[in-house]
Image (cartoon, helix red, strand yellow):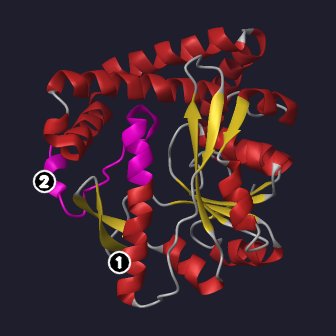
Amino acid sequence: MSEEASQFDRALYRVVMSYRFLSRILPRRVWLRAGKCLGLLSYLADSRHRKIISTNLRLAFGTEKEEKDIRSLTRRIYMQFGMIGHEWMQLKDISPGELSELVHVEGREHLVSAKKKSKSVILLSAHFGNWEYAHLFYASTINKLTFIVRKIDNPLLEKERIAYNQRAGVNIVYKENGLREAIRNLKRGRDLVIFADQNVNMREGIPCYFFGKKASTISLVPALAKKFQVPVVPMFMVRSQDMLHHRILFLPELDFGPDMSEEGIQKSTQRMNDAIEKVVRSYPDHWLWFHRKWKCYYPEIYQF
């Protein structure tokens, strides 16, 4: 790791690793319940992000949900990501066999159909459910994967992430300079997963609608798909009712068409947004509502 860790980084790393030790001695169900409890405590203590989530939910759902529903859903979001956080702490030790027992595949036929057209595919995904489980499962059982990410601020935790991803067959590249490598890997037959759900500034994004509200949206997925003639298959991970198990959902391939004009890219990007919105509407507690998704066009709603 080229970056030198600060004293704070080292202290935080020791705390995380010490807490992670509990995940190795507690039954998985007990560990997940502890994650739900931690999520609930975070809901009570974290007023800043709680306001962001509830603001986003009100804008997205409008009159579809009453205020009591917004509060209930906000609590569920915190508990969901409390469980995901606890699962992430086990990723260093989890084996492909254990993942196969925890993950059930639905819609594999959509992926198979897309792969008949090209030796590699782009997987459209989002900060939704336990996406790390999805990537590790995919890379260890289906095909090696490239994932474009933002680097974790703590270099010691980033080193851990790189290690367990590489072990499973996931190549981590960074947003700042990793696109060329991702394209090279795509041409070689390694699939590429891209998250397209977060807000981007207006120089990087184009105006599209998400939950009926204008949002600055990255157009990288349709641009790459059209340029390199690669199929795009939406992929999302959904937690089952028993908390322990997950379903990895492959949805039908998105038909973007060949039009590379500005209008063609805009229409395809909107189609991409519609696919993400549909799954978020179905499982609203699975999406990362913690960020200011609509701040480019509705900055006033985040003035707390």
Q: Is residue 259 left or right of residue 152?
A: left
Residue kind at label 1, given as amino acid type: Arg
Residue drawn at x 56%, y 35% is: 238
Residue tagged by mark 2? 300
Whether residue 229 is visible, yes or no, is yes
Residue at position x 53%, y 71% from top?
Answer: 221
- Give amino acid for label 2: Glu
Picture quadrant of residue 59:
top left
Question: Which disc is residue 203 wearing?
Answer: 1
Q: Which residues are magenta?
A: 276-304
Toward the viewer: 59 or 177? 59
- Residue 27 is situated, as x and y percent measured from the top left of the image, at 72, 9
Report the label total.
Answer: 2
For the residues bearing labels 2 and 1, Cβ distance under 8 angstroms? no
Residue 159 shows in this picture: no
x and y percentages locating residue 277 in the rendered image: 38, 51
Which quadrant does the C terminus fall into?
Answer: top left
Looking at the rendered structure, the secondary structure element under dot 2 is: helix
Quadrant (top left, top right, bottom left, bottom right) of the N terminus: bottom right
Q: Compared to 81, does 106 lie above or below?
A: below
- The percent coordinates of residue 292 (x first, y second) are 30, 50
Note whether 300 is above or below 71 in the view shown. below
Q: Is residue 205 above or below residue 197?
A: below
| Mark 1 element type | loop
Instruction: Choose the circle earlier in sequence order: 2 or 1.
Output: 1
Q: Which mark is residue 222?
A: none
Q: Position of residue 152 (x, y in %)?
A: 59, 49
